Amino acid sequence: MTGNGTAHDEKKVARLLRRAAKQDLASAQYALGLCFKLGASVVHDEEEAVKLYTQAAERGRAQAQVNLGYCYEKGIGCVQDDARAARLFRQAAEQGDSSGQFALGDCYRTGAGVEQNLALAALGVRLEKGRGV
């Protein structure tokens, strides 16, 4: 992460994101989760990334729901759970998130965490808020 017009200071980035995440700001929880997942500005820690993605996902952050879904799908920083991954992808898809829609469509294609449904998979599972599949 870099700033415009300021010197790059990774420790400061992490410190500010931690402060904002503690104030329950979903965008900061998501961003700090990314930092832990990638080892950027902090030590690489997939379990901490999952914890932060969970906090942001619970506050409705679609990108966090997708990233957390991938963690559960692959067992990264948590126990692998296809059904939970599919639920998280659905939450993001219902907000119109294209990554969530694609990931949920892939779940329907493979039957991972949901009953296999190739028709839904072919549609890319485009969901609108308030309308489910």
Image: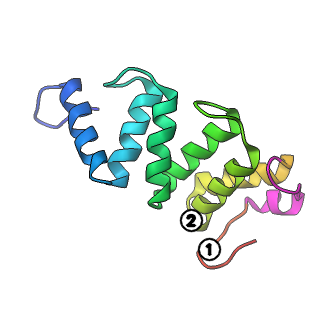
Please name whichever residue, 24 or 63, is drawn nearer the observer in this view of the structure: 24
Q: How far across and how far down the image is residue 94, in percent?
A: 61, 67
Q: Which residue occupies the foreground of this view, 55 or 123?
A: 55
Identified at 87% across, 57% down, the residue is: 115
Residue type at the position of mark 2:
Gly
Position of residue 73 in the picture relative to residue 96 (left or right) = right
Is any part of residue 102 visible from this angle? yes
CB of mark 1 within 8 Å of CB of mark 2? Answer: yes
Q: Residue sitting at 41 percent across and 45 percent down?
A: 30
**What secondary structure is found at the residue carrying circle 2?**
loop
The image quadrant that residue 41 belongs to is: top left
Residue 69 image point, x, y percent: 62, 46
Q: Quadrant of the N terminus?
A: top left
Q: Write down the residue under mark 2.
A: 96
State the residue position of label 1.
128
Q: Nearer the viewer, residue 31 or 5?
A: 31
Can you say whether 22 is above or below 61 in the image?
A: above
Instruction: Indicate the secondary structure of the residue bearing disc 1.
Output: loop
Residue at the far top: name it.
43
The residues bearing labels 1 and 2 have C-alpha atoms spaced at a distance of 6 Å
Q: Nearer the viewer, residue 102 or 22?
A: 22
Residue 109 at x, y percent in the picture: 84, 50
Q: Is residue 91 above or below residue 33?
A: below
What residue is drawn where x is 45% and y is 26%? 38
- Total marks shown come to 2
Q: Is residue 2 visible?
A: no
The residue shown at (23%, 25%) is: 10
Three-letter code, disc 1: Glu
Q: Which mark is residue 32?
A: none
Q: In the image, is 111 to the left or to the right of 40?
A: right
Residue 7 image position (x, y, % from top left): 12, 26
The range drawn in magenta is: 112-124
